[in-house]
Image (cartoon, helix red, strand yellow):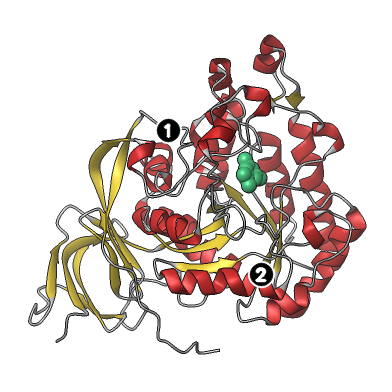
Amino acid sequence: MAENTYLIRGAAILGGEAQDLLIHDGVIAARGTDLSEEGATVIDGKGLVALPGMVDVHTHLREPGREDAETVETGTRAAALGGFTAVHAMANSNPVADTAGVVEQVHSLGRASGWVDVRPVGAVTVGLAGEQLAELGAMADSRAQVRMFSDDGMCVHDPVLMRRALEYVKAFDGVVAQHAQEPRLTAGAQMNEGTVSAVLGLTGWPAVAEESIIARDVLLTQHVGSRLHVCHVSTAGSVEIVRWAKARGINVTAEVTPHHLLLTDELVRSYDPVYKVNPPLRTDADVQALREGLADGTIDVIGTDHAPHPSEHKECEWAQAAMGMTGLETALSVVQETMIETGLMTWADFARVTSFTPAAIGRVADQGRPLEVGEPANVILVDPAARWTVDPHKMATMGRNSPFKGRELPGSVVATFFKGHPTVLDGRLNTPYKHPAVSSN
Ligand code: DOR
């Protein structure tokens, strides 16, 4: 066998039974015990958990136009190190990804980098301005084959436009991913509205600004019979509304970020803008409801909302600072700490919320597949016993704005296989996957 053959010896598959996985020519060629290692590079999987490569439904790669914050190359390196084999690149680049040309550019940059699959998200409205529908059909038909559309960072607040978008995406099995934020209720808002905002004298961002849009959108989705995804759910009330909608059979999915599973608005007392994010960090009661919602399936997936910013936009006074946090390289560890070490989820559940369901929402072919013979080898190996201290300066992302800086976290990604190729080995970047020269499209 050739150099593209790897034998992972004795890793716990989805945290269950320890078995061998043979990876050959991009697929899982065998699974069992005592597999022959002839011709294979052997990787000792003892004590490690084998999982399907993670799929992020919500990543800001910033290119084109904001290469001072991140590039497709640096962001996808961070993704591979974090255990991802696919990311959805949000549309709020410059120019905005609201045309077939821009989404094809992002798609091509992703292929050229070769660290993960890059699935461009198309904007819902031209320039994210919320006034006119973007060319959704052209983006869907383009080489990028866009299936997810979002004005993330901005809310599609006009109900007529939202209705039209939900109707339009049905033609190509798309999904509208809404950033739920009623703009009039959040004008000038700096943090969660509550006790801490009252004490600090900062303009608050009420939970109802998120909840009222989600309530409206699930009803619109039911009305037109479409598919809705709710980005970064952050309040207990939002969880309740999604639960209500699902009980009525409305086709809605929802995501939660790792930071909303761990951090609260108490941190804003430090006035450190690393904690400034949209939606804002909420209260401990919200954190508990989000964890329960993820555990019981009300919230479907983890979305990192990886949002790198140049230091000058974060290391300044609170009111001027940009909103957003990095997250690709810490997501697995934060979910392990908040959901697995608390006993709320197993590693099999982890695979569901970080891989199987995110790939299904984005209609990402060849990702989020079970670790079975014949399946594409998008596989990660995790050391759940590892502990490490977050140092933003040692990360692959250009963004230094990790809210977990200095924190000790459990779990590390030992290896990432993307299409059968090890992009990460021994916890370090290896080499990118080389796509065949001619696109299959
Ligand atoms: O904090 C955020 N930052 N939330 C968003 O929705 C957008 C993102 C960004 O692009 O920086």
The tag on residue 102 is: 2
Residue 404 is tagged as 1
Q: Is the CB of the residue bearing disc 2 within 8 angstroms of ligand 1?
A: no
Which residue is nearer to you in this view: 77 or 24? 77
| Ligand number 1: quarter of image | top right
Residue 291, position as x, y percentages in the image: 52, 39
- In the rendered image, the quadrant that contains the C terminus is bottom right
Residue pictured at 16% horizontal, 85% vertical: 2
Q: Mark 2 belongs to which amino acid?
A: Val
Picture disc at residue 304: none
| Residue 67 location (% of width, % of height) | 54, 53
Q: Is residue 152 visible?
A: yes
Q: Nearer the viewer, residue 72 or 295?
A: 72
Q: Is residue 17 left or right of residue 130?
A: left
Q: Residue at x 23, y 42 (%)?
A: 386
- Left or right side of 345 for 357: right
Instruction: Tell me the kind of residue under disc 1.
Output: Phe
Tell which circle, 1 or 2, labels the residue nearer the N-terminal end: 2
Q: Is residue 270 depicted above or below 6 in this figure?
A: above
Q: Residue at x 74, y 23 (%)?
A: 204
Q: Nearer the viewer, mark 1 or mark 2?
A: 2
Q: Nearer the viewer, residue 83 or 3?
A: 3
Give the quadrant of the N terminus: bottom left
Q: For the point 49% across and 61% down, which residue is it?
A: 72
